[in-house]
Amino acid sequence: MILLDTVVLSELRKHDTSPQVIRWLTGYQDTDLFLSVVSIGEIVMCPR
């Protein structure tokens, strides 16, 4: 189980996402990745 934090979510929203982040995430199955309601709220409520 991997809990993704707001920094990772923000990075994934960029047009030029870091290749290291993408490489790291591709090592996991989708079912291993989770989001916190706090991180979701920060993404929804805060501008880029």
Image (cartoon, rainbow, N blue to C red):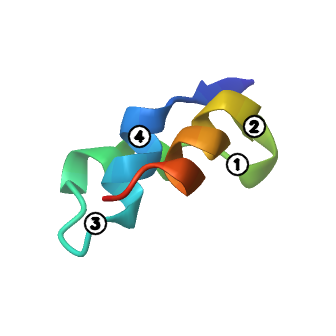
In primary-sequence order, the first of circles 2 and 3 is 3
Q: Is residue 22 visible?
A: no
Real-space CA distance between mark 1 and mark 2, rounded to the nearest whole angstrom? 5 Å
Amino acid carrying mark 4 in the image: Val
Say what secondary structure mark 1 lies in.
loop
Amino acid carrying mark 3 in the image: Lys
Say what secondary structure mark 3 lies in.
loop
Q: Nearer the viewer, residue 44 or 23?
A: 44
In primary-sequence order, the first of circles 1 and 4 is 4
For residue 29, which numbered disc appears in the image?
A: 1
Residue in the picture at 49% in, 53% down: 26
Amino acid carrying mark 2 in the image: Asp
In this rendering, would 35 be left or right of 48?
right
Residue 7, image quadrant: top left
Residue occupied by mark 3: 14
Residue occupied by mark 2: 32
Residue 38, image quadrant: top right
Locate residue 14, reporting x and y percent.
28, 66
Residue occupied by mark 4: 8
The quarter in which the C terminus is drawn is bottom left
Real-space CA distance between mark 2 and mark 3, rounded to the nearest whole angstrom? 22 Å
**Nearer the observer, disc 4 or disc 2?**
4
Locate residue 8, reporting x and y percent.
41, 40
Amino acid carrying mark 1 in the image: Gln
Q: Residues within 10 Å of mark 3 (few under 14, many from 20)?
A: few
Real-space CA distance between mark 3 and mark 4, rounded to the nearest whole angstrom? 10 Å
Circles 1 and 2: CB distance less than 8 Å? yes
Real-space CA distance between mark 1 and mark 4, rounded to the nearest whole angstrom? 16 Å
In this rendering, would 40 be left or right of 42?
right
